[in-house]
Image (spheres, rainbow, N blue to C red):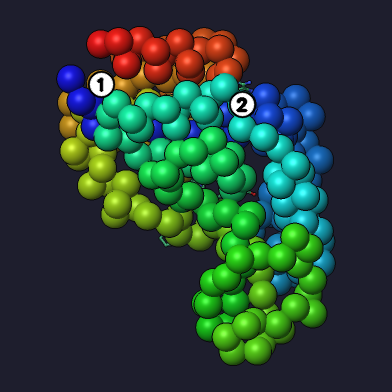
Amino acid sequence: MKEQIVILTGAGISAESGLGTFRDEGGLWAKHRIKDVATPEGFMRDPELVLGFYNMRRAEAVKATPNAAHVALAALEAAHDVLIVTQNVDGLHEAAGARNVLHMHGSLARAMCVRCEARWDAPLVMRVTDTCPECGAAATRPDIVWFGEMPYGMEEIDAALREATLFASVGTSGNVYPAAGFVAEARRMGVPTVELNLEPSAGHSMFDEVHVGPASEVVPKWVNALCRS
Ligand code: BV8
């Protein structure tokens, strides 16, 4: 049977590709304070610090390669209608061949203008002196959704959840809203829910099924079972 699957992914799916997660031991939020590097206020206070943080992550992301979990989710598109809603700002889902990917928290590959809100492909290294290609203002920033900012695609995500026959959550701690609330929304609409994570997340009890283990192992197994059903 062709499923309509909405798959939320988080930093855990990219961990085995060598990209840091946020809340694991030694994660990004152990080395940087969220309010300094992932809020608009932090950017206004010290744009160089914030651009440096994202330049470092962009340099790592361009060197990373998709792992078996990204590849398996991309393969799922051949057999089912899939929307990958990723909280991640790396491009590993697309690099693995996935076509229907929604970056709800933006992307390291994109930049935007604070003044005119134009968006374009980000240079590898962003500098405070960079100017907007549209309006010329020296007011560029990463096209990343920071805390307190509205995530992208919320209407599209709500519509996809309403049509879904299955909701899966892969590699996320379930700490950050509104993403962390999608499982409750799916349940309210009677959509079956499954979590695939290295360890049960904060919201694991909300899921009908929980597969515990590294994404590169549990995700291909889950995809194979789905494609056999
Ligand atoms: C908004 C930017 C409103 C890019 C990110 C109190 C209650 C409820 C909500 C709030 C509240 N106070 C404030 C809020 C709102 C806030 C929020 O939820 N805060 C939390 C901390 C309480 N949310 C917001 O501000 C959001 N916006 O609410 O806007 C609004 C409304 C109208 C108009 C305007 C505004 C915006 C949130 C987006 C922030 N940006 N990222 C970047 O720098 O990357 S958040 C960042 O953390 C990520 O993007 C991601 O979304 C989030 C969670 O990270 P995870 O992906 O889950 O990673 P984490 O490290 O936490 O977990 C990794 C998991 O992987 C673990 O479970 C681990 O076990 C697992 N794992 C590890 N290795 C593996 C593995 N799994 C499998 N295999 C492995 N190998």
Which residue is depicted at the point 49% across and 38% down?
97
Quadrant in which residue 129 is drawn: bottom right
Q: Is mark 2 on a helix, strand or loop?
A: loop
Q: State the quadrant of the C terminus.
A: top left
The residue to which callout 2 is attached is 67
Q: Name the residue under label 1.
A: 192
Which residue is at 61% across, 32% downward?
66
Horizontal and vertical percent position of residue 45: 75, 69
Using the rendered view, name the quadrant where residue 67 is placed: top right
Badge 2 residue CB within 8 Å of ligand 1: no
182 on left or right of 16: left
Query: Above or below — where is 228 with respect to 53?
Result: above
Q: In screen coordinates, is 114 left or right of 156?
A: right
**Does 5 sit left or right of 116 as displayed?**
left
The residue type indicated by label 2 comes to: Asn
Image point 61% across, 66% down: which residue?
Answer: 121
Under tag 1, what secondary structure?
A: loop
Q: Specify the quadrant that holds the N terminus.
A: top left
Front in this rendered view, residue 99 or 174 = 99
Q: Is residue 150 left or right of residue 29?
A: left
From this view, report whether residue 118 is shown above or below residue 23: below
Q: What residue type is labelled 1?
A: Pro
Residue 68, image x, y percentages: 57, 22
Label 1 crowd bin: few (<14), some (14–19), many (20+), radius 10 Å: some
Whether residue 150 can be seen here: yes
User: Which is more foreground, mark 1 or mark 2?
Assistant: 2
